[in-house]
Image (cartoon, rainbow, N blue to C red):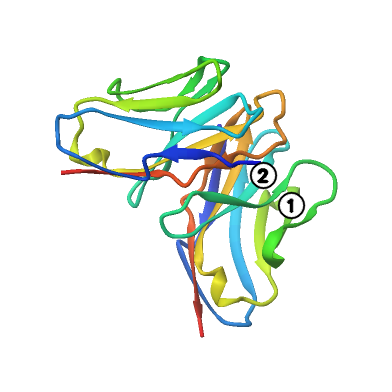
Amino acid sequence: AQSVTQLGSHVSVSEGALVLLRCNYSSSVPPYLFWYVQYPNQGLQLLLKYTTGATLVKGINGFEAEFKKSETSFHLTKPSAHMSDAAEYFCAVKRGNQFYFGTGTSLTVIP
Amino acid sequence: KAGVTQTPRYLIKTRGQQVTLSCSPISGHRSVSWYQQTPGQGLQFLFEYFSETQRNKGNFPGRFSGRQFSNSRSEMNVSTLELGDSALYLCASSLGQQFQNTEAFFGQGTRLTVV
């Protein structure tokens, strides 16, 4: 079965500080992994994805994520948080054409 | 190119009524999936359509149904609405299963409130 676990339903960081959002997956085969962001009353927007190849994936808005097979992790990071980064973040694994989403992490950025 | 369009954006219905939500996928995308998002349950998969056929279905009662038309547009219907059906309903389009490494593109959602 496919599942994704996001550690920490709420994360607060100061503006300019490092953002680290954690995601672990369970999969018997190398997965396709995604990070999406959702702003209030909006749909989900793709931040980045890992399919194959380079394990460090760069996305939009300065975010990146590293695929670590040994740790079954795909944590999302950003070196310096901006106020505009405040949103809900979802990690997802894809099998077939179905996405399995984590429960989400709400990011608050403190000025 | 145009994104995924969901209509209407907001809807208020009374318990017992039925509702139909619409989703127009990105041009060329043949797969449409529907998700229900609530604060308590998060994002839950409803069903997926590809070339007018339902290929996958989540764990929802039969009151939730959908269909896809030949132009890939999709509708979902909820009959006999319950208060617990209040949620943001998201539609996502993608190229299809043969493109497993591709992402889904989401619409802005339909916010359904059942009173």
**Mark number displayed over residue A33:** 2
Q: CA distance from mark 2 to mark 1?
A: 9 Å
Q: Residue at x 70, y 30 (%)?
A: B100
Task: Write down the residue under mark 1.
Answer: A67
Image mark count? 2
Q: Position of residue A75 (x, y in %)?
A: 65, 59
Q: The residue marked by circle 2 belongs to what chain?
A: A
Mark 2 and mark 1 lie on one chain; the one further toward the N terminus is 2
Query: Which element type, helix, strand or loop, lies under badge 2?
Result: strand
| Both marks 2 and 1 on one chain | yes
Taking B91 as reference, is A35 left or right? right
The three-letter code of the residue at mark 2 reads Leu
| B31 is higher (above) or lower (below) than A36 | above
Q: The residue marked by circle 1 belongs to what chain?
A: A
Query: Which element type, helix, strand or loop, lies under badge 1?
Result: strand
The three-letter code of the residue at mark 1 reads Phe
- In which quadrant is the N terminus of chain B drawn? top right
Tell which of A45 and A4 is nearer to you: A45
Taking A97 as reference, is B64 left or right? left
Tell which of A14 and B53 is nearer to you: B53
Q: Residue at x 70, y 74 (%)?
A: A79
| B35 is higher (above) or lower (below) than B72 | below
Q: Residue at x 59, y 54 (%)?
A: A23
Q: Position of residue B5 (x, y in %)?
A: 50, 39
- In which quadrant is the C terminus of chain B drawn? top left
How crowded is the residue under tag 2: few (<14 C-alpha within 10 Å), some, or many (20+)?
A: many
Q: Position of residue A82 (x, y in %)?
A: 60, 76
Write down the quadrant of residue A29 in the picture: top right
Q: Residue furthest bottom?
A: A111
**Mark number displayed over residue A16:** none
User: Mark 2 against mark 1, which lies toward the viewer?
Assistant: 2
Q: Position of residue B88 (x, y in %)?
A: 36, 45
